[in-house]
Image (spheres, coloured by chain):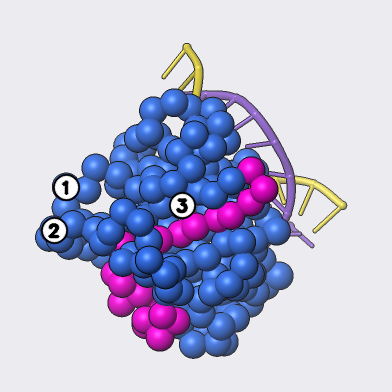
Chain colours: A blue, B yellow, C purple
DNA sequence: CTTTCGATCCGT
DNA sequence: CGGATCGAAAGG
């Protein structure tokens, strides 16, 4: 099965992209091995959205968000974790889709080693967790997802097949303090790999 | 320059 | 429920 890159044309509209990315595969190849997972939970962050890092304009940190779609935006949060985004929208518009959870597909033992946990359910069910499981870091920030060690692929082109069909859930986002009611979080109902946000 | 605080996770 | 841990961004 040839591995096809995820069509960048599907990233033009950020909300639609957040939906379209459900089922796509994120794969990272390193000397340690290959890790990959299917995207099962996303959040859209928009230009006129106060919860969006790029809302107050372009800064050194948010620069990747203003670049062309199909690249990575990875940032440090709480001084210890990192979050991975797919840059979306036209160049010059600071928008992106946060990847919140993956269904582990490949390299599970490597993921376990990197995460320091055994339970498969705790490998990629959170934005910080999946970054750690895939071994992503600052070096991947602002890199292309079309080619290279970190790739975004269409679901059908990856061993494991496409995701099962289920009702789409569109609900408020997790962990933000502004624009808390915008329905910009996407996942399929009943998917067991979706994160379980901390009730705080 | 100083202070604040976050698109999180984990152990208790 | 509190702590870790640090840099970006806001405030003075």
Q: Is residue A159 visible?
A: yes
Q: Disc 2 designates what residue?
A: A166
A190 or A153: nearer the viewer: A153
Dot 1 and dot 2 residues touching (CB under 8 Å): yes
Q: Secondary structure at mark 1?
A: loop
Are labels 1 and 2 on one chain?
yes
Residues in magenta?
A: A7-32
Dot 1 and dot 3 residues touching (CB under 8 Å): no
Q: Disc 3 designates what residue?
A: A36
Name which of mark 1 and mark 3 comes first in the sequence. Answer: 3
Q: Residues within 10 Å of mark 1 (few under 14, many from 20)?
A: few
| Residue A16 covered by magenta stretch | yes
Measured in 3D between alpha carbons, the distance from the residue under mark 1 to the one under mark 3, in whole angstroms, is: 21 Å
Q: Secondary structure at mark 2?
A: loop
Measured in 3D between alpha carbons, the distance from the residue under mark 1 to the one under mark 2, in whole angstroms, is: 8 Å
Q: Residues within 10 Å of mark 3 (few under 14, many from 20)?
A: many
Q: Residues within 10 Å of mark 2 (few under 14, many from 20)?
A: few
Q: Position of residue A129 (x, y in %)?
A: 48, 42
* Chain to which the residue tagged by mark 3 belongs: A
Q: Disc 1 designates what residue?
A: A190
Q: Nearer the viewer, mark 1 or mark 3?
A: 3
């Amino acid at each position: 099965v040839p591995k096809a890159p995820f069509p960048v044309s599907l990233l033009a509209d950020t909300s639609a992209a957040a939906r379209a990315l459900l089922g796509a595969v994120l794969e990272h190849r390193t000397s340690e091995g290959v890790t990959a997972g299917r995207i099962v939970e996303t959040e859209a962050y928009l230009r006129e959205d106060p919860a969006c890092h790029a809302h107050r304009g372009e800064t050194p940190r948010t620069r990747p968000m203003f670049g062309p779609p199909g690249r990575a935006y990875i940032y440090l949060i709480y001084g210890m974790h990192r979050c991975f985004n797919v840059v979306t929208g036209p160049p010059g518009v600071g928008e992106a889709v946060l990847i919140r959870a993956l269904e582990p597909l490949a390299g599970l033992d490597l993921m376990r080693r990197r995460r320091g946990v055994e339970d498969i359910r705790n490998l990629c069910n959170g934005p910080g967790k999946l970054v750690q499981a895939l071994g992503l870091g600052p070096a991947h920030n602002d890199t292309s997802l079309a080619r290279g060690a970190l790739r975004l692929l269409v679901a059908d082109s990856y061993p494991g097949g496409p995701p099962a069909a289920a009702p789409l859930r569109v609900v408020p986002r997790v962990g933000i303090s502004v624009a808390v009611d915008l329905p910009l979080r996407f996942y399929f109902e009943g998917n067991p790999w979706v994160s379980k946000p901390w009730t705080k």
